[in-house]
Amino acid sequence: MNWTWFHRLASPPYVYGLAARLTPWFAWPAALCIIAGLWGGLVLAPPDYQQGDGFRILYVHAPSAWMSLMVYMSMATAAAVGLIWRIKVAHAVAASCAPIGASFTFAALVTGALWGEPMWGTYWEWDPRLTSELVLLFLYLGYMGLRAGIEDTQRADRASAVLAIVGVVNVPIIHYSVTWWNSLHQAPSVMRLAKPAMPLAMLLPLLLMLLGFTLFFVALLLVRLRGEVLARERAASWIREVVSA
Amino acid sequence: MSRSEGTVAQAFPSIDAPAVPVAASNALAFPRADAREAARLALLRDLHLAFRKRGQLVQPLAFFAMVTLLFPLAISPELARLRELAPGVLWVGALLGSLLALEFLFRDDAYDGTLEQYALSGQSLTALMFAKTLAHWLLTGLPLALMAPLVAISLGVATTAVPGILLSVAIGTVALSLIGSIGAALTLGIKRSGALLSLLTLPLSLPVLIFGARATQLAIHGASLVAPLELLAALAILGVTLAPLAAAAAVRISLE
């Protein structure tokens, strides 16, 4: 089997060019999916029989929450690849993931709080999902703080990779312990969306938004990755050619 | 050089050696102690060093007592209300006390080059990290656990809850020390790392806090605390198996 395509992915100049070429292929479909999803979710979908129009924040909240976890997994996977095979580009991918993931987590928390106000009557409820989302934000902040604290890039890469992997082991433990903790404090009566009974007109825009957010993440990641590679390789000669071109 | 450090030097033939190649040849020239013996000596060394600076040992305990004092002053001196809050006060205090001591877990050894010698000694760094963490627990976790019942009684908890509180804090601090060793190793060499260390360690410590506080609460109410104790023990065992590996990897990275 020919592995050249894979080995080329470890070369910064190749990845830089590839990221530039791939960006529009993710950015445009992302924009289309998000516009279609928002149109479907905010205009076409019928109001919920219990929550009225308030439920529509779901179309931003659920994809953000989904992305916050997915970005963490991508970040940890990239960090592990970088740590195991000593691939610098993989570390650059992990470093680019962190701020995006933290932003999605923040968006999920804010939209969750805004949704909570009309539904629960309070902006913040110590609901297990909101609490684990908050802990996830702290995990992102810790990762970024560790990266910023170590001046040497290679050491920062490897140390933060260890942290990301430790975090992945801990995320499920934290999630289940928080769920367990909450179920002791209060009956899970807060608010239950009738889970499977979501009509297609509501579900379809949600799926579109999920797809759109995922594509949006990849497009953002590619842009950030180019910046990261430029910063890391600023001493290399190929940078001068790229910049002067 | 004291007797204790002399025995360590035998276990780590390279302890006085200046650089890498010498260490490698020394390792061949001396018979190397097995990993368990090396870990035992590293543990004894840490305990010896700590007992020479007894003043530092008391600090986490004083901090724990101080944090406890804040709650009656800030909330209410009524014992009935304090009793309800006792599990939270105890565990937040123990968590912060253990966190306070973490900064010193590797710092002195990193400054004087001991960690570097450990890494070059050819001994399993994982075993040595486990030994260091165990020493840290014996010096902070165990005293905190012994003090927790006193703190609980001062908050109006009945004496019947003492064994349960002692046991839950003792097991919980094992997990806290192990989780903390990863954070302490990762932040080695970072200046003013205190806040960062808390930011890294606290989110990972939340499960210990949850199960520990629950066990303490059950102990105070006189109920069976087997379930949360078992979960605490599971966390501690998971920590024993994985945390020294991660800490050793982090120490190696910080020495690069």
Image (tube, coloured by chain):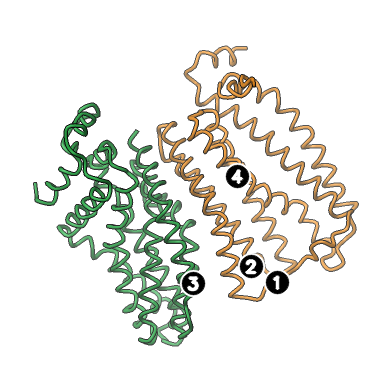
**Chain B drawing hue:** green
In the rendering, at what x and y percent does residue A125 appear?
63, 67
Q: Are marks 2 and 1 in contact (CB under 8 Å)?
A: yes
- In the image, taking residue A241 as reference, residue B53 lies left or right, namely left
How far apart are the alpha carbons under marks 4 and 1?
Answer: 29 Å
In the rendering, at what x and y percent does residue B36 appear?
27, 50
Give the number of the mark in front: 3 or 4.
3
The quarter of the image holding the C terminus of chain B is: top left
Chain in orange on the image: A
Residue denoted by label 1: A190
How far apart are the alpha carbons under marks 2 and 4?
Answer: 26 Å
Give the number of the mark in front: 2 or 4.
4
| Label 2 crowd bin: few (<14), some (14–19), many (20+), radius 10 Å | some
Which residue shows up at 54% across the image and 14% down it? A238
Q: Are marks 1 and 3 in contact (CB under 8 Å)?
A: no
Disc 2: host chain:
A
User: Which quarter of the figure has residue B56?
Assistant: bottom left
Q: Secondary structure at mark 3?
A: helix
Residue denoted by label 4: A73
Q: Are marks 4 and 1 in contact (CB under 8 Å)?
A: no
| Label 3 crowd bin: few (<14), some (14–19), many (20+), radius 10 Å | many
Give the number of the mark in front: 4 or 1.
4
Residue denoted by label 3: B228
Residue type at mark 2: give it: Glu
